[in-house]
Image (tube, rainbow, N blue to C red):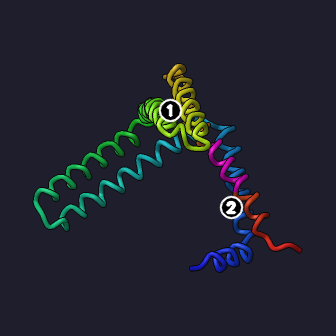
Amino acid sequence: MSGASIAQGLRQNWWWLLVMGIVYVIAGFVAIGHPIMASYAVELVIGVILIVGGIISIIGSFFSGDWKRLLLIFISGILYLVVGYLLIKDPISGVVTLTLLLAAFLLVEGIFKIIHAFQMKPTPNWGWLLVSGIASLILGGLIYSEFPSSSTYILGLLVGIYFLINGFSMIMFSFAVKEPA
């Protein structure tokens, strides 16, 4: 598919992007307005995804054709199932665990981005990577400093912010690809 045909398709269906953007914005406001509910929803979705992934891995392991791979894929599938089940069985502990993992991820990612930024220092705009790394460190530090009380709302709040940004981007993009009247 050529770039011109993609652009033409977007022009003809610009209103779908607009509708999806509006839905994302509404979902973002709902998640930000009810971050605890949204945090639990995120946690439950992750639990279901892990269970489905575990079932697929276990079934797929029998088609691996090799006992060593079968065993590794099968055990991995069991791990997915167990973790998914634990998240669904005890959502409060799941939200706390996911929040702690998010804080750790952001801290480690921030450190790596900062190191990478200084490695790229001679290239133009390397500072943006540095800013991103510092932002990740600050966000991870803020989440961790308020832990465990932040765990009840932070996932939902971040998902809400993501939905808002994504929604507004889609709305603006839909107007950009719309044919002039």
Q: Which residues are magenta?
A: 160-169
The amino acid type, in three-letter code, at marker 2 is Met
Residue 9 appears at what percent x and percent y?
68, 77
**Badge 2 density bin: few <14, some 14–19, many ≥20, Cα 10 Å:** some
**Which secondary structure type mostly characterizes the magenta part of the structure?**
helix
Q: Which mark is residue 126?
A: none
Task: Please give the name of the residue rendered at 74% of the width and 70% of the height, measured from the top-left corner.
Answer: 14
Residue at 56% across, 24% down: 142
Left or right of 73 in this view: 20? right
Kindly tell me whether residue 115 is visible in this rendering: yes
Which is nearer the eye, 123 or 73? 123
Which residue, as the protein is rendered here, is positioned at the far right? 181
Residue 15 in picture, x, y percent from top left: 75, 69
Query: Given contact means CB atoms under 8 Å apart, are the residues at marks 2 and 1 in contact?
Result: no
Numbered mark located on residue 114 in the image: 1
Residue denoted by label 2: 20
Residue type for callout 1: Ile
Q: Nearer the viewer, residue 136 or 3?
A: 3
Q: Residue at x 25, y 64 (%)?
A: 60
Q: Earlier in the sequence, mark 2 or mark 1?
A: 2
Q: Is residue 94 above or below residue 81?
A: above
